[in-house]
C-alpha cells in the first residue's frame, strides 16, 4: 500500500520522538493513502512561507499481524470517544501500534469543539460528521512498526 505524509521537509526515516501530543490519535507519525489529502495538508506550510513537501512510502501491511491495530471504519461513538481522549491528552486504556480512521479536519474539529463545549450532544455531533467528505489517516504509534514496515520511496515539493 502507498501512503503519503505532508510536511515542510522530506522525511526519509520517521522518528516518533518528534511527534506532537494531543492530535486525533495521539502521538504518532501520520500518513494517508489519499495523495490529495497529504498535498492539502502540506499546503499549510506554504502559507507560512515554508516548503510544501510530500513524502511517499510503501507500507508493508501484510506482515503486521502481531501488531496492535485499531481501525475505525466510520465516524462513530468509538471514534469520537477515542479522538476526544487523545485530543485532551488523557491516558488510553490500551497502547496501539497503528490506528487507522477518519481525520478531524477543520470542519470536523469545529464540530468536536461544539461537543467539547457542551453546545451540542453526542448524537448531533455524529449526525454532523456523517456528511463530511471521506478521508483516512494511518497513525503509526510504534517506532518498530515504522522501522520494519514503512519504507521511504521518494518525495516531491508542491
Image: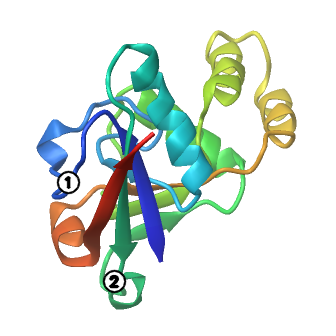
Where on the picture, by quarter, is residue 65? Answer: bottom left
- Name the spot of residue 100 as percent of width and height, x first: 51, 60
Q: With respect to residue 24, does 96 lie above or below?
A: below
Residue at position x 20%, y 54% in the image: 14
Q: Which residue is mark 2?
A: 64
Determine whether, in the image, residue 87 is placed left or right of residue 92: right
Determine the residue positioned at 35% across, 28% down.
Answer: 89
In the rendered image, which quarter is residue 69 located in? bottom left
> Along the horizontal axis of the image, is 124 left or right of 4?
right
Front residue of 110/45: it is: 45
Residue 75 showing in the rendered view:
yes
Quarter of the C terminus within the rendering: top left
Label 1 Cα crowd, 10 Å radius (few <14 / some 14-19 / many 20+): some
101 on left or right of 18: right
Residue 131 at x, y = what percent? 87, 40
Q: Badge 2 local density, few (<14 within 10 Å), some, or many (20+)?
A: some
Residue 108 image point, x, y percent: 68, 29
Q: Nearer the viewer, residue 87 or 91?
A: 87
Quadrant of the rendered image containing residue 19: top left
Mark 1 element type:
loop
Q: Residue at x 40, y 82 (%)?
A: 61
Q: Which mark is residue 14?
A: 1
Note whether 125 is above or below 27 in the view shown. above
Tag 1 or tag 2, which sits nearer the N-term?
1
Give the CA distance from mark 2 to mark 1: 18 Å
Vertical placement of 125 versus 131: above or below?
above
- Measuring from the top left, give residue 106's x and y in whole percent: 63, 24
Kindly identify which numbered label has been placed on residue 62: none
Amino acid at each position: 500500500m502507498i501512503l503519503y505524509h505532508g510536511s515542510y521537509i522530506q522525511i526519509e526515516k520517521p522518528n516518533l520522538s518528534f511527534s506532537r501530543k494531543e492530535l486525533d490519535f495521539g502521538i504518532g507519525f501520520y500518513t494517508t493513502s489519499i495523495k490529495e489529502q497529504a498535498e492539502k495538508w502540506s499546503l499549510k506550510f506554504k502559507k507560512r512561507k515554508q516548503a510544501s513537501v510530500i513524502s511517499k512510502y510503501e507500507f508493508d501491511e501484510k506482515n503486521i499481524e502481531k501488531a496492535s491495530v485499531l481501525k475505525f471504519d466510520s465516524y462513530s461513538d468509538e471514534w469520537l470517544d477515542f479522538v476526544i481522549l487523545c485530543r485532551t491528552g488523557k491516558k488510553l486504556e490500551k497502547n496501539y501500534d497503528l490506528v487507522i480512521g477518519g481525520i478531524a479536519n477543520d470542519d470536523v474539529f469545529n464540530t468536536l469543539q461544539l461537543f467539547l463545549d457542551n453546545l451540542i450532544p453526542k448524537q448531533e455531533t455524529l449526525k454532523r460528521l456523517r456528511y463530511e467528505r471521506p478521508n483516512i489517516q494511518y497513525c503509526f504509534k510504534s517506532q518498530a512498526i515504522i522501522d520494519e514496515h514503512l519504507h521511504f520511496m521518494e518525495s516531491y515539493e508542491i
